Amino acid sequence: MDFPATLLHGARGTGLWESLLEAASGLLCEAPGRVLAPWQSRACGTCAGCHLVRAGTHPDLRVVLPAALAAELGWGAEEGAEAGQGEAKGAAAGREIGIEQVRGLIDWAQGTSHRGGPKVALVHPLDAMAAPAANALLKVLEEPPASLCFLTGTHQLDRVLPTLRSRCSLRAWKRPGAEAALAELQRRGQADAEAVLHWSRRAVFEADPARGLDWTRRLVRQLAEGRVTQLDGVTPAQALESLQKLTLDLVRVRSGLAPSYLAELDAPLRRLAGRGDTGAWLQWWQRLAQAARTPDFPVHAGLAVQAWVVELQQLCTSGTN
């Protein structure tokens, strides 16, 4: 069996991790007559192999994640995360895949299959590797052991090192359709599913696709009424993301288009759009985007959010029609 390495790439919250795990499950399924090809194999969900994958204990599956992401996904007990947990804690606060994790993967890859089928290495995200870890991983990609299927993903394809990207078959992952995204929100019991569908732009597989929505609703209503009280309940990163979405909706409404993120607030957005200046809002959005690239904030979180809200309030009152 010869499995080319696959790099799945797509936007955050669109189910990329879920698809990678589903592909791994299909390959490791032990039902009779299965097709051994990524994204063509379908797991039966009932065989011993499927039970082991679901429990995170399949000996022929190696999942390598940054420590922070492993905890977020509830995959903290798997061997790949444990192998580099101590190292990863010191590497960008657990946001990187460390070289010890990759070395553990290499050692595991050289062994024979425990259950007589393929072995699956799942590394995500591939852009979370510093140069030493990436160089070590190249050994597996250049000379993969027999029956090893290498699956990986990224939300930022341009940040994957070219040496890694060139050795993988690229596969684009699209956003789920509106119907499928709405069904996922309803399955989760998400309140205001229709509003969250618009707010997340169908990126409904995020841990919290409604993140920042209630805060932005309150902000819009207060701006429309001309009074902004203290707004808490968000981190600076969440506030930046929410303010970017709000600003783009204001620009759209100002241009005669319907809002993309806050369709439910069409009326108050139109009142605000009539007060502001499109050019100033676009410059403001660019400043927000620049601030969002900074991983840590040098000022108190509450003061940072308050400063951005005050600036937005000024933009909504000082523009001309």
Image (cartoon, helix red, strand yellow):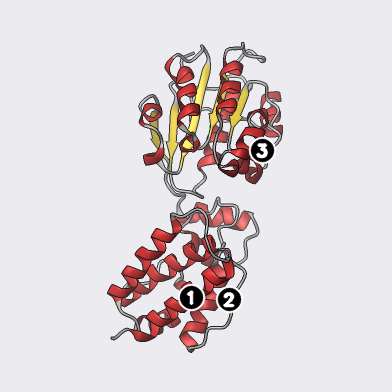
Q: Amino acid at mark 2?
A: Leu
User: Can residue 7 be seen in the rendering of this structure?
Assistant: yes
First of labels 2, 3 by sequence position:
3
Q: In the rendered image, which residue does mark 2 sit on? A: 231
Disc 3 target residue: 75
SS of the residue at dot 3? loop
Q: CA distance from mark 1 to mark 2?
A: 9 Å
Residue 280 location, x and y as percent? Answer: 31, 74
Horizontal arrangement in the rendering, residue 52 relative to residue 63 (left or right): right
Give the amino acid at mark 3: Trp
The spot of residue 163 in percent (x, y) is 37, 27
What residue type is disc 1 on?
A: Val
Which label belongs to residue 309? 1
Question: What residue lies at 55% left-to-right and 50% top-to-bottom?
Answer: 205
Q: Which mark is residue 21?
A: none
Say which residue appears at 47% left-offset and 17% top-offset: 139
Could you say which quadrant of the image residue 86 lies in?
Answer: top right
